[in-house]
Protein backbone atom coordinates (compact mmCIF):
# COMPACT_ATOMS: atom_id res chain seq x y z
CA UNK A 1 0.00 0.00 0.00
CA UNK A 2 1.27 3.49 -0.87
CA UNK A 3 2.20 5.94 1.85
CA UNK A 4 -0.88 8.00 2.53
CA UNK A 5 -0.76 11.69 1.86
CA UNK A 6 -1.42 13.96 4.80
CA UNK A 7 -1.63 17.67 4.13
CA UNK A 8 0.51 19.95 6.26
CA UNK A 9 -1.64 21.22 9.11
CA UNK A 10 -2.17 24.85 8.16
CA UNK A 11 -5.46 25.21 10.00
CA UNK A 12 -5.44 28.00 12.58
CA UNK A 13 -6.26 27.54 16.25
CA UNK A 14 -9.83 28.05 17.33
CA UNK A 15 -10.00 31.36 19.26
CA UNK A 16 -9.92 30.45 22.94
CA UNK A 17 -9.79 33.81 24.70
CA UNK A 18 -11.22 37.31 24.17
CA UNK A 19 -7.70 38.35 23.11
CA UNK A 20 -7.74 35.75 20.33
CA UNK A 21 -11.11 36.96 19.07
CA UNK A 22 -10.09 40.62 19.25
CA UNK A 23 -6.83 39.94 17.41
CA UNK A 24 -8.78 38.42 14.50
CA UNK A 25 -11.54 41.03 14.31
CA UNK A 26 -9.94 43.43 11.82
CA UNK A 27 -8.75 40.60 9.59
CA UNK A 28 -12.17 38.92 9.46
CA UNK A 29 -13.76 42.25 8.48
CA UNK A 30 -11.13 43.08 5.84
CA UNK A 31 -11.84 40.12 3.51
CA UNK A 32 -9.53 41.46 0.73
CA UNK A 33 -5.78 42.08 0.79
CA UNK A 34 -2.73 42.57 -1.42
CA UNK A 35 0.16 40.10 -1.48
CA UNK A 36 3.53 41.31 -2.83
CA UNK A 37 6.30 38.89 -3.84
CA UNK A 38 9.47 40.88 -4.48
CA UNK A 39 13.13 40.01 -4.25
CA UNK A 40 16.28 39.12 -6.15
CA UNK A 41 14.34 36.59 -8.22
CA UNK A 42 12.77 39.51 -10.11
CA UNK A 43 16.13 40.00 -11.88
CA UNK A 44 16.30 36.65 -13.76
CA UNK A 45 12.49 36.84 -14.06
CA UNK A 46 12.19 33.14 -14.89
CA UNK A 47 15.33 32.72 -17.05
CA UNK A 48 18.73 31.40 -16.01
CA UNK A 49 21.80 31.26 -18.24
CA UNK A 50 19.62 31.91 -21.25
CA UNK A 51 17.21 29.08 -20.48
CA UNK A 52 13.59 29.50 -19.32
CA UNK A 53 13.08 27.75 -15.99
CA UNK A 54 9.68 26.07 -15.51
CA UNK A 55 7.60 26.95 -12.49
CA UNK A 56 6.97 30.04 -10.43
CA UNK A 57 9.40 32.93 -10.58
CA UNK A 58 10.46 33.18 -6.94
CA UNK A 59 11.50 29.50 -6.92
CA UNK A 60 14.11 29.89 -9.67
CA UNK A 61 17.03 29.27 -7.31
CA UNK A 62 15.49 25.95 -6.28
CA UNK A 63 14.17 24.87 -9.69
CA UNK A 64 17.46 25.64 -11.48
CA UNK A 65 19.50 24.43 -8.47
CA UNK A 66 21.57 27.60 -8.53
CA UNK A 67 24.52 27.48 -6.11
CA UNK A 68 24.48 30.09 -3.38
CA UNK A 69 27.70 31.65 -4.67
CA UNK A 70 26.09 32.18 -8.09
CA UNK A 71 22.73 33.39 -6.81
CA UNK A 72 24.41 35.93 -4.49
CA UNK A 73 25.76 37.68 -7.61
CA UNK A 74 22.24 38.97 -8.27
CA UNK A 75 22.37 41.25 -5.22
CA UNK A 76 24.80 43.83 -6.70
CA UNK A 77 22.45 44.06 -9.72
CA UNK A 78 19.35 44.81 -7.62
CA UNK A 79 18.63 48.53 -7.79
CA UNK A 80 14.85 49.16 -7.88
CA UNK A 81 15.04 52.86 -8.64
CA UNK A 82 11.34 53.01 -9.64
CA UNK A 83 10.11 51.71 -6.28
CA UNK A 84 7.44 54.06 -4.91
CA UNK A 85 6.00 52.98 -1.56
CA UNK A 86 3.19 55.53 -1.68
CA UNK A 87 2.10 54.36 -5.14
CA UNK A 88 2.03 50.72 -3.97
CA UNK A 89 -0.03 51.53 -0.87
CA UNK A 90 -2.36 53.77 -2.88
CA UNK A 91 -2.92 51.04 -5.45
CA UNK A 92 -3.97 48.64 -2.70
CA UNK A 93 -6.35 51.26 -1.32
CA UNK A 94 -7.75 52.07 -4.77
CA UNK A 95 -8.43 48.36 -5.31
CA UNK A 96 -10.49 48.20 -2.13
CA UNK A 97 -7.90 46.13 -0.28
CA UNK A 98 -7.73 46.48 3.48
CA UNK A 99 -4.31 44.98 4.17
CA UNK A 100 -0.99 44.42 2.43
CA UNK A 101 1.53 41.60 2.95
CA UNK A 102 5.03 41.83 1.46
CA UNK A 103 7.89 39.31 1.38
CA UNK A 104 10.44 40.42 3.97
CA UNK A 105 12.44 37.23 3.34
CA UNK A 106 11.46 34.53 0.88
CA UNK A 107 12.93 31.04 0.58
CA UNK A 108 16.07 32.36 -1.12
CA UNK A 109 17.08 33.83 2.26
CA UNK A 110 17.53 37.41 1.03
CA UNK A 111 16.02 40.08 3.30
CA UNK A 112 14.23 42.92 1.54
CA UNK A 113 14.80 45.11 4.61
CA UNK A 114 17.76 46.41 6.63
CA UNK A 115 18.59 43.49 8.91
CA UNK A 116 21.26 43.59 11.61
CA UNK A 117 20.95 39.80 11.85
CA UNK A 118 22.36 39.26 8.34
CA UNK A 119 24.35 41.20 5.76
CA UNK A 120 22.46 39.32 3.04
CA UNK A 121 19.90 42.11 2.76
CA UNK A 122 18.86 44.97 0.52
CA UNK A 123 20.68 47.65 2.53
CA UNK A 124 24.05 45.91 2.78
CA UNK A 125 24.26 43.83 -0.40
CA UNK A 126 22.70 46.04 -3.11
CA UNK A 127 23.36 49.48 -4.60
CA UNK A 128 19.80 50.53 -3.64
CA UNK A 129 20.94 51.43 -0.14
CA UNK A 130 17.45 52.02 1.29
CA UNK A 131 15.00 50.05 3.39
CA UNK A 132 11.81 49.74 1.29
CA UNK A 133 9.86 48.28 4.20
CA UNK A 134 10.42 51.46 6.24
CA UNK A 135 8.99 53.49 3.38
CA UNK A 136 6.13 51.06 2.84
CA UNK A 137 5.24 51.05 6.55
CA UNK A 138 4.91 54.85 6.49
CA UNK A 139 2.91 54.77 3.25
CA UNK A 140 0.50 52.13 4.56
CA UNK A 141 -0.12 54.10 7.75
CA UNK A 142 -0.91 57.17 5.66
CA UNK A 143 -3.26 55.20 3.39
CA UNK A 144 -5.02 53.41 6.26
CA UNK A 145 -3.81 49.97 5.10
CA UNK A 146 -2.73 47.30 7.59
CA UNK A 147 0.80 46.09 6.89
CA UNK A 148 1.97 42.50 7.20
CA UNK A 149 5.20 40.69 6.41
CA UNK A 150 5.72 37.35 4.70
CA UNK A 151 8.67 35.61 6.39
CA UNK A 152 9.88 32.15 5.40
CA UNK A 153 10.55 30.39 8.70
CA UNK A 154 11.43 26.90 7.48
CA UNK A 155 12.90 27.01 3.98
CA UNK A 156 15.97 29.21 3.58
CA UNK A 157 18.17 28.11 0.70
CA UNK A 158 20.99 30.33 1.96
CA UNK A 159 21.34 28.60 5.34
CA UNK A 160 22.70 25.10 6.11
CA UNK A 161 20.36 24.62 9.08
CA UNK A 162 17.13 25.38 7.22
CA UNK A 163 15.16 23.18 4.85
CA UNK A 164 15.08 23.30 1.07
CA UNK A 165 18.64 23.47 -0.27
CA UNK A 166 19.98 19.97 -0.98
CA UNK A 167 22.47 20.99 -3.68
CA UNK A 168 24.74 23.18 -1.52
CA UNK A 169 23.89 21.30 1.69
CA UNK A 170 23.39 17.54 1.04
CA UNK A 171 20.17 16.10 2.40
CA UNK A 172 22.01 13.29 4.22
CA UNK A 173 23.89 15.76 6.42
CA UNK A 174 22.34 16.72 9.78
CA UNK A 175 20.75 20.16 9.96
CA UNK A 176 20.74 22.41 12.99
CA UNK A 177 17.24 23.71 12.45
CA UNK A 178 16.88 24.96 16.01
CA UNK A 179 20.12 26.89 15.57
CA UNK A 180 18.77 28.46 12.37
CA UNK A 181 15.60 29.55 14.19
CA UNK A 182 17.67 30.99 17.01
CA UNK A 183 20.31 32.77 14.90
CA UNK A 184 18.26 34.11 11.97
CA UNK A 185 14.49 33.66 12.14
CA UNK A 186 13.87 35.04 15.63
CA UNK A 187 16.32 37.97 15.32
CA UNK A 188 14.77 39.02 12.01
CA UNK A 189 11.24 38.65 13.39
CA UNK A 190 12.25 40.85 16.32
CA UNK A 191 13.48 43.47 13.87
CA UNK A 192 10.28 43.33 11.83
CA UNK A 193 8.10 43.60 14.91
CA UNK A 194 10.03 46.40 16.63
CA UNK A 195 11.31 48.65 13.82
CA UNK A 196 8.25 49.20 11.60
CA UNK A 197 5.40 50.19 13.89
CA UNK A 198 2.20 48.16 14.37
CA UNK A 199 2.19 45.06 12.16
CA UNK A 200 -1.04 43.30 11.25
CA UNK A 201 0.33 39.83 10.63
CA UNK A 202 3.36 37.65 9.94
CA UNK A 203 2.70 35.38 6.97
CA UNK A 204 4.77 32.26 7.59
CA UNK A 205 5.11 29.62 4.88
CA UNK A 206 5.94 25.99 4.00
CA UNK A 207 6.25 24.16 7.34
CA UNK A 208 8.56 21.20 6.68
CA UNK A 209 11.06 20.60 9.48
CA UNK A 210 9.36 22.72 12.11
CA UNK A 211 7.93 20.85 15.09
CA UNK A 212 4.75 21.48 17.05
CA UNK A 213 6.74 23.04 19.89
CA UNK A 214 8.73 25.25 17.52
CA UNK A 215 5.59 26.45 15.72
CA UNK A 216 3.93 27.33 19.01
CA UNK A 217 7.07 29.04 20.29
CA UNK A 218 7.28 31.28 17.21
CA UNK A 219 3.60 32.25 17.48
CA UNK A 220 4.12 33.10 21.16
CA UNK A 221 7.22 35.09 20.22
CA UNK A 222 5.18 37.14 17.72
CA UNK A 223 2.44 37.78 20.29
CA UNK A 224 4.97 38.78 22.96
CA UNK A 225 6.46 41.41 20.66
CA UNK A 226 3.11 42.64 19.29
CA UNK A 227 0.07 41.16 21.07
CA UNK A 228 -2.33 42.18 18.26
CA UNK A 229 -0.20 40.75 15.44
CA UNK A 230 -1.54 37.61 13.74
CA UNK A 231 0.48 34.55 12.76
CA UNK A 232 -0.67 32.77 9.60
CA UNK A 233 -1.59 29.10 9.54
CA UNK A 234 1.49 28.24 7.51
CA UNK A 235 3.52 28.40 10.68
CA UNK A 236 2.35 24.77 10.68
CA UNK A 237 1.04 22.26 13.21
CA UNK A 238 -2.27 24.08 13.71
CA UNK A 239 -0.56 26.81 15.74
CA UNK A 240 -1.48 29.88 13.68
CA UNK A 241 -4.18 32.42 14.41
CA UNK A 242 -6.00 31.64 11.16
CA UNK A 243 -5.91 28.98 8.47
CA UNK A 244 -4.31 29.07 5.05
CA UNK A 245 -5.76 27.17 2.12
CA UNK A 246 -3.53 26.10 -0.75
CA UNK A 247 -2.26 28.58 -3.31
CA UNK A 248 -5.21 29.54 -5.53
CA UNK A 249 -7.39 26.95 -3.76
CA UNK A 250 -11.16 27.50 -3.72
CA UNK A 251 -13.12 25.46 -1.14
CA UNK A 252 -16.27 23.61 -2.12
CA UNK A 253 -18.49 25.41 0.37
CA UNK A 254 -18.49 27.57 3.47
CA UNK A 255 -15.87 26.42 5.99
CA UNK A 256 -15.66 26.80 9.75
CA UNK A 257 -13.02 28.99 11.31
CA UNK A 258 -10.91 31.82 9.93
CA UNK A 259 -9.38 31.07 6.51
CA UNK A 260 -7.57 32.80 3.68
CA UNK A 261 -6.75 31.89 0.08
CA UNK A 262 -3.54 33.37 -1.32
CA UNK A 263 -3.93 33.80 -5.06
CA UNK A 264 -2.14 34.94 -8.19
CA UNK A 265 -3.38 37.12 -11.05
CA UNK A 266 -1.41 35.06 -13.54
CA UNK A 267 0.49 31.83 -12.74
CA UNK A 268 3.51 33.17 -10.85
CA UNK A 269 4.06 35.06 -7.59
CA UNK A 270 7.47 36.63 -8.15
CA UNK A 271 7.80 38.50 -11.45
CA UNK A 272 8.30 36.28 -14.48
CA UNK A 273 8.73 38.02 -17.81
CA UNK A 274 7.08 35.32 -19.95
CA UNK A 275 3.97 34.74 -17.80
CA UNK A 276 1.14 36.55 -19.59
CA UNK A 277 -1.64 34.20 -18.47
CA UNK A 278 -3.58 36.96 -16.74
CA UNK A 279 -6.96 36.23 -15.21
CA UNK A 280 -9.69 38.56 -16.43
CA UNK A 281 -11.32 41.14 -14.18
CA UNK A 282 -14.52 39.09 -14.47
CA UNK A 283 -12.75 36.01 -13.11
CA UNK A 284 -11.02 37.88 -10.28
CA UNK A 285 -14.25 39.54 -9.14
CA UNK A 286 -16.17 36.28 -9.26
CA UNK A 287 -13.49 34.55 -7.21
CA UNK A 288 -13.60 37.39 -4.68
CA UNK A 289 -17.38 37.03 -4.42
CA UNK A 290 -17.18 33.24 -4.22
CA UNK A 291 -14.59 33.27 -1.45
CA UNK A 292 -16.44 35.91 0.55
CA UNK A 293 -19.54 33.73 0.28
CA UNK A 294 -17.55 30.89 1.83
CA UNK A 295 -16.19 33.05 4.64
CA UNK A 296 -12.66 33.12 3.20
CA UNK A 297 -10.30 36.10 2.79
CA UNK A 298 -8.79 36.75 -0.67
CA UNK A 299 -5.09 37.71 -0.64
CA UNK A 300 -4.37 38.67 -4.24
CA UNK A 301 -0.76 38.88 -5.41
CA UNK A 302 1.32 41.29 -7.47
CA UNK A 303 4.92 40.61 -8.47
CA UNK A 304 6.91 43.82 -9.04
CA UNK A 305 9.81 43.96 -11.47
CA UNK A 306 13.45 44.30 -10.47
CA UNK A 307 13.09 48.06 -11.05
CA UNK A 308 10.27 48.22 -8.53
CA UNK A 309 7.30 48.57 -10.87
CA UNK A 310 4.06 46.64 -10.45
CA UNK A 311 3.23 45.19 -13.91
CA UNK A 312 0.64 47.20 -15.87
CA UNK A 313 -1.82 44.25 -16.26
CA UNK A 314 -1.93 43.93 -12.46
CA UNK A 315 -2.52 47.66 -12.04
CA UNK A 316 -5.30 47.70 -14.64
CA UNK A 317 -7.09 44.77 -13.00
CA UNK A 318 -6.80 46.15 -9.49
CA UNK A 319 -8.19 49.51 -10.51
CA UNK A 320 -11.16 47.80 -12.18
CA UNK A 321 -11.80 45.74 -9.06
CA UNK A 322 -11.63 48.94 -7.03
CA UNK A 323 -14.34 50.54 -9.15
CA UNK A 324 -16.62 47.60 -8.36
CA UNK A 325 -15.71 47.65 -4.68
CA UNK A 326 -16.57 51.35 -4.32
CA UNK A 327 -20.15 50.46 -5.26
CA UNK A 328 -20.43 46.97 -3.82
CA UNK A 329 -17.86 46.70 -1.02
CA UNK A 330 -20.64 46.54 1.57
CA UNK A 331 -21.33 43.01 0.33
CA UNK A 332 -17.71 41.98 1.06
CA UNK A 333 -16.38 43.88 4.08
CA UNK A 334 -17.40 42.64 7.50
CA UNK A 335 -19.60 39.89 6.11
CA UNK A 336 -19.97 36.29 7.19
CA UNK A 337 -20.34 33.22 5.00
CA UNK A 338 -23.41 32.12 3.11
CA UNK A 339 -25.72 30.58 5.77
CA UNK A 340 -26.77 27.75 3.44
CA UNK A 341 -23.25 26.31 3.51
CA UNK A 342 -23.16 25.22 -0.12
CA UNK A 343 -22.38 27.12 -3.32
CA UNK A 344 -24.95 28.25 -5.89
CA UNK A 345 -24.70 27.97 -9.68
CA UNK A 346 -25.75 31.61 -10.09
CA UNK A 347 -23.23 33.19 -7.69
CA UNK A 348 -22.70 33.63 -3.96
CA UNK A 349 -24.34 34.89 -0.78
CA UNK A 350 -22.81 36.85 2.09
CA UNK A 351 -24.49 37.92 5.32
CA UNK A 352 -24.24 40.82 7.73
CA UNK A 353 -26.66 41.32 10.60
CA UNK A 354 -30.20 41.05 9.22
CA UNK A 355 -29.05 41.41 5.59
CA UNK A 356 -28.28 38.91 2.88
CA UNK A 357 -26.25 39.99 -0.14
CA UNK A 358 -26.83 38.06 -3.36
CA UNK A 359 -23.70 38.37 -5.51
CA UNK A 360 -25.08 37.31 -8.88
CA UNK A 361 -22.58 36.25 -11.53
CA UNK A 362 -25.00 34.37 -13.81
CA UNK A 363 -27.92 36.68 -14.55
CA UNK A 364 -31.31 34.92 -14.27
CA UNK A 365 -33.29 37.29 -16.49
CA UNK A 366 -36.23 39.21 -15.08
CA UNK A 367 -36.94 36.70 -12.30
CA UNK A 368 -34.63 35.46 -9.55
CA UNK A 369 -35.67 32.53 -7.35
CA UNK A 370 -34.18 31.46 -4.02
CA UNK A 371 -35.39 28.42 -2.09
CA UNK A 372 -35.24 27.76 1.62
CA UNK A 373 -35.24 31.29 3.08
CA UNK A 374 -37.42 31.22 6.19
CA UNK A 375 -37.30 34.95 6.99
CA UNK A 376 -39.76 37.58 5.88
CA UNK A 377 -38.05 39.98 3.47
CA UNK A 378 -38.82 43.55 4.47
CA UNK A 379 -37.03 45.21 1.58
CA UNK A 380 -35.02 44.25 -1.48
CA UNK A 381 -32.91 46.40 -3.81
CA UNK A 382 -29.77 46.42 -5.92
CA UNK A 383 -26.78 47.72 -4.00
CA UNK A 384 -25.98 50.02 -6.93
CA UNK A 385 -29.50 51.52 -6.72
CA UNK A 386 -30.58 51.33 -3.04
CA UNK A 387 -33.47 53.77 -3.40
CA UNK A 388 -35.23 51.64 -6.05
CA UNK A 389 -36.95 48.66 -4.42
CA UNK A 390 -37.25 45.30 -6.11
CA UNK A 391 -40.60 43.54 -6.13
CA UNK A 392 -40.61 40.59 -3.72
CA UNK A 393 -42.86 37.55 -3.66
CA UNK A 394 -42.68 34.86 -0.98
CA UNK A 395 -44.63 31.61 -0.84
CA UNK A 396 -45.07 29.44 2.21
CA UNK A 397 -44.54 25.73 2.17
CA UNK A 398 -46.69 23.22 4.04
CA UNK A 399 -44.90 23.89 7.33
CA UNK A 400 -45.81 27.57 7.24
CA UNK A 401 -42.27 28.75 6.56
CA UNK A 402 -41.09 31.16 3.87
CA UNK A 403 -39.67 28.72 1.39
CA UNK A 404 -39.72 30.23 -2.10
CA UNK A 405 -38.50 33.77 -2.71
CA UNK A 406 -38.95 35.48 -6.08
CA UNK A 407 -37.42 38.83 -7.01
CA UNK A 408 -38.50 40.80 -10.08
CA UNK A 409 -35.27 41.94 -11.67
CA UNK A 410 -34.15 44.00 -14.67
CA UNK A 411 -34.10 41.92 -17.83
CA UNK A 412 -30.38 42.60 -18.28
CA UNK A 413 -27.69 42.47 -15.59
CA UNK A 414 -26.90 46.03 -14.43
CA UNK A 415 -23.31 44.89 -13.87
CA UNK A 416 -22.28 42.13 -16.31
CA UNK A 417 -19.56 40.95 -13.92
CA UNK A 418 -21.22 40.74 -10.50
CA UNK A 419 -24.50 42.43 -9.60
CA UNK A 420 -25.40 42.62 -5.91
CA UNK A 421 -28.97 42.43 -4.64
CA UNK A 422 -29.68 43.12 -0.95
CA UNK A 423 -32.37 41.42 1.13
CA UNK A 424 -33.26 43.20 4.37
CA UNK A 425 -34.80 40.56 6.64
CA UNK A 426 -36.96 40.51 9.74
CA UNK A 427 -34.05 39.12 11.78
CA UNK A 428 -30.87 37.10 11.57
CA UNK A 429 -30.88 34.88 8.47
CA UNK A 430 -32.72 31.59 8.92
CA UNK A 431 -32.48 29.07 6.08
CA UNK A 432 -33.12 25.45 5.28
CA UNK A 433 -29.56 24.11 5.05
CA UNK A 434 -30.52 20.82 3.41
CA UNK A 435 -29.04 20.50 -0.08
CA UNK A 436 -31.74 20.96 -2.64
CA UNK A 437 -32.53 21.33 -6.29
CA UNK A 438 -31.78 24.79 -7.61
CA UNK A 439 -33.98 26.83 -9.98
CA UNK A 440 -31.86 25.66 -12.92
CA UNK A 441 -32.83 22.08 -12.04
CA UNK A 442 -29.45 20.93 -10.70
CA UNK A 443 -28.48 19.44 -7.35
CA UNK A 444 -24.89 19.60 -6.08
CA UNK A 445 -23.91 17.53 -3.05
CA UNK A 446 -20.61 18.42 -1.37
CA UNK A 447 -18.89 16.06 1.11
CA UNK A 448 -19.18 18.34 4.15
CA UNK A 449 -23.00 18.25 3.90
CA UNK A 450 -23.22 14.46 3.81
CA UNK A 451 -23.56 12.02 6.68
CA UNK A 452 -20.57 9.72 7.07
CA UNK A 453 -21.43 6.07 7.61
CA UNK A 454 -18.52 4.16 9.15
CA UNK A 455 -19.25 0.58 10.26
CA UNK A 456 -17.52 -0.77 13.34
CA UNK A 457 -13.91 -1.55 12.53
CA UNK A 458 -13.89 0.51 9.33
CA UNK A 459 -11.81 3.60 8.73
CA UNK A 460 -13.78 6.84 8.60
CA UNK A 461 -13.86 9.32 5.76
CA UNK A 462 -11.84 12.49 6.30
CA UNK A 463 -13.15 15.73 4.80
CA UNK A 464 -10.51 18.39 4.24
CA UNK A 465 -11.22 22.12 4.47
CA UNK A 466 -10.85 22.27 0.69
CA UNK A 467 -13.96 20.08 0.55
CA UNK A 468 -12.27 16.97 -0.83
CA UNK A 469 -12.48 13.66 0.97
CA UNK A 470 -9.58 11.47 1.94
CA UNK A 471 -11.45 8.20 1.63
CA UNK A 472 -9.41 5.01 1.98
CA UNK A 473 -11.83 2.33 3.22
CA UNK A 474 -14.55 0.98 0.88
CA UNK A 475 -16.58 -0.04 3.93
CA UNK A 476 -17.43 3.61 4.64
CA UNK A 477 -20.08 5.60 2.74
CA UNK A 478 -21.64 9.05 2.44
CA UNK A 479 -25.36 9.82 2.45
CA UNK A 480 -27.13 13.09 1.66
CA UNK A 481 -30.77 13.96 2.30
CA UNK A 482 -31.76 16.28 -0.54
CA UNK A 483 -34.91 18.13 -1.55
CA UNK A 484 -36.26 17.84 -5.09
CA UNK A 485 -38.93 20.33 -6.18
CA UNK A 486 -39.15 19.69 -9.95
CA UNK A 487 -39.36 16.02 -10.98
CA UNK A 488 -37.25 15.05 -13.96
CA UNK A 489 -34.70 12.59 -15.28
CA UNK A 490 -31.35 13.45 -13.78
CA UNK A 491 -27.91 12.67 -15.12
CA UNK A 492 -25.64 11.71 -12.21
CA UNK A 493 -21.97 12.66 -12.18
CA UNK A 494 -19.32 12.05 -9.54
CA UNK A 495 -16.66 14.78 -9.50
CA UNK A 496 -13.23 13.98 -8.09
CA UNK A 497 -10.33 16.33 -7.55
CA UNK A 498 -6.65 16.57 -6.71
CA UNK A 499 -5.41 16.95 -3.17
CA UNK A 500 -3.35 19.97 -2.19
CA UNK A 501 0.30 18.99 -2.35
CA UNK A 502 -0.37 16.09 -4.74
CA UNK A 503 -2.11 17.84 -7.62
CA UNK A 504 -2.17 14.51 -9.47
CA UNK A 505 -5.44 12.76 -10.25
CA UNK A 506 -5.30 9.22 -8.88
CA UNK A 507 -7.17 6.42 -10.63
CA UNK A 508 -8.34 2.93 -9.66
CA UNK A 509 -11.60 3.69 -7.81
CA UNK A 510 -15.11 2.36 -8.42
CA UNK A 511 -18.27 3.85 -6.89
CA UNK A 512 -22.01 3.25 -6.74
CA UNK A 513 -24.85 5.73 -6.18
CA UNK A 514 -28.21 4.65 -4.73
CA UNK A 515 -31.11 7.10 -5.13
CA UNK A 516 -34.89 6.85 -5.70
CA UNK A 517 -34.74 3.06 -5.92
CA UNK A 518 -32.04 3.03 -8.59
CA UNK A 519 -28.38 2.01 -8.41
CA UNK A 520 -25.74 3.42 -10.74
CA UNK A 521 -22.17 2.10 -10.72
CA UNK A 522 -18.98 2.93 -12.62
CA UNK A 523 -15.19 3.22 -12.47
CA UNK A 524 -14.03 6.77 -11.83
CA UNK A 525 -12.21 8.23 -14.82
CA UNK A 526 -10.41 11.46 -15.76
CA UNK A 527 -12.12 11.57 -19.15
CA UNK A 528 -14.22 14.70 -18.57
CA UNK A 529 -12.10 17.51 -17.22
CA UNK A 530 -14.00 20.40 -15.65
CA UNK A 531 -12.86 23.75 -16.99
CA UNK A 532 -13.39 26.55 -14.49
CA UNK A 533 -11.48 29.17 -12.54
CA UNK A 534 -12.04 27.05 -9.45
CA UNK A 535 -10.43 23.97 -10.97
CA UNK A 536 -7.58 25.67 -12.84
CA UNK A 537 -4.92 24.97 -10.19
CA UNK A 538 -6.58 21.93 -8.59
CA UNK A 539 -7.96 19.97 -11.57
CA UNK A 540 -11.32 18.25 -11.30
CA UNK A 541 -12.76 15.42 -13.37
CA UNK A 542 -16.34 14.19 -13.74
CA UNK A 543 -17.46 10.60 -14.24
CA UNK A 544 -20.93 10.03 -15.68
CA UNK A 545 -22.66 7.20 -13.83
CA UNK A 546 -25.93 7.27 -15.78
CA UNK A 547 -29.46 8.64 -15.38
CA UNK A 548 -32.17 8.29 -12.77
CA UNK A 549 -35.83 9.30 -12.88
CA UNK A 550 -37.39 11.10 -9.90
CA UNK A 551 -41.15 11.26 -10.47
CA UNK A 552 -42.44 13.46 -7.68
CA UNK A 553 -41.28 16.34 -5.45
CA UNK A 554 -39.97 15.41 -2.04
CA UNK A 555 -37.04 14.51 0.15
CA UNK A 556 -34.71 11.77 -1.12
CA UNK A 557 -31.63 10.07 0.25
CA UNK A 558 -28.66 9.69 -2.07
CA UNK A 559 -26.02 7.24 -0.88
CA UNK A 560 -22.52 7.05 -2.35
CA UNK A 561 -20.58 3.86 -1.78
CA UNK A 562 -17.03 2.98 -2.77
CA UNK A 563 -17.01 -0.40 -4.45
CA UNK A 564 -13.21 -0.28 -4.67
CA UNK A 565 -10.48 2.17 -3.65
CA UNK A 566 -7.00 1.92 -5.12
CA UNK A 567 -4.67 1.08 -2.20
CA UNK A 568 -1.81 2.77 -4.02
CA UNK A 569 -3.63 6.13 -4.20
CA UNK A 570 -1.81 8.39 -1.77
CA UNK A 571 -4.80 10.70 -1.36
CA UNK A 572 -7.44 7.99 -1.36
CA UNK A 573 -10.69 8.69 -3.17
CA UNK A 574 -10.69 12.50 -3.47
CA UNK A 575 -14.40 13.22 -3.84
CA UNK A 576 -15.32 16.83 -4.65
CA UNK A 577 -19.10 16.48 -5.13
CA UNK A 578 -21.94 14.50 -6.62
CA UNK A 579 -23.94 16.45 -9.21
CA UNK A 580 -27.42 15.76 -10.58
CA UNK A 581 -28.22 17.73 -13.73
Image: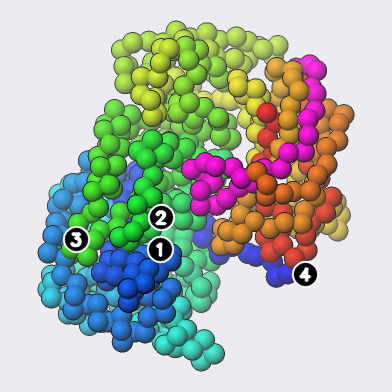
SS class, disc 2: loop
Circle nearer the viewer, 2 or 4: 2
4 or 1: tag closer to the N-terminus = 4
Counting residues from the start of the chain, the first of labels 4 and 3 encountered is: 4
- Where 488 sits versus 303, above or below? above
Query: Within the image, what quadrant is residue 220 found in?
Result: bottom left
| Res 295 seen here | no
Instruction: Quadrant for residue 66, please give it.
Output: bottom left
Q: Residue at x 16, y 65 (%)?
A: 80
Rendered image coloring scheme: rainbow
Name the residue carrying label 2.
267
**Mark 1 or 3, nearer chain start:** 1
Circle 4: element type: loop
Q: CA distance from mark 2 to mark 3?
A: 20 Å
Does dot 1 land on a helix, a strand or a loop? loop
Assign a secondary structure to mark 3. Answer: loop
Please give the label number shown on residue 308.
3
Residue 570 placed where, x, y %? 69, 64
- Which stretch did the figure color magenta? 529-553
Q: Is residue 539 magenta?
A: yes
How much space separates mark 4 and mark 3, taking CA atoms? Answer: 50 Å
Amino acid sequence: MATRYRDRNTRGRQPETPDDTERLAWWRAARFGMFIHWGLYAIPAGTWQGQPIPGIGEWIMHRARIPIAEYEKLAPQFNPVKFDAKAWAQLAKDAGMQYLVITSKHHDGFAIFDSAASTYDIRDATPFGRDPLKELAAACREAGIRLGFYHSQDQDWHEPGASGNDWDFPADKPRDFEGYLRSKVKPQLRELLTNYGPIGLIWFDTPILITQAQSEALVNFVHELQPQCLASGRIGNGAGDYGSLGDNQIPAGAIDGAWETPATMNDTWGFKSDDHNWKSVDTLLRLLADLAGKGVNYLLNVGPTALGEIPAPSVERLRAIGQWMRVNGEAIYGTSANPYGYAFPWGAITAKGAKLYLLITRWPGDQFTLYGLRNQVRKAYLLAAPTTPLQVEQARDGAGQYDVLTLRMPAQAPDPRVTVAVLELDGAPSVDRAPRQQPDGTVALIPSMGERDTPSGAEGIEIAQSGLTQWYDPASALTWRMRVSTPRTFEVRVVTGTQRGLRVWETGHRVAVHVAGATLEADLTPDERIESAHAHYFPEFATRLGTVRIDRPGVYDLRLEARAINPEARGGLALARVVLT
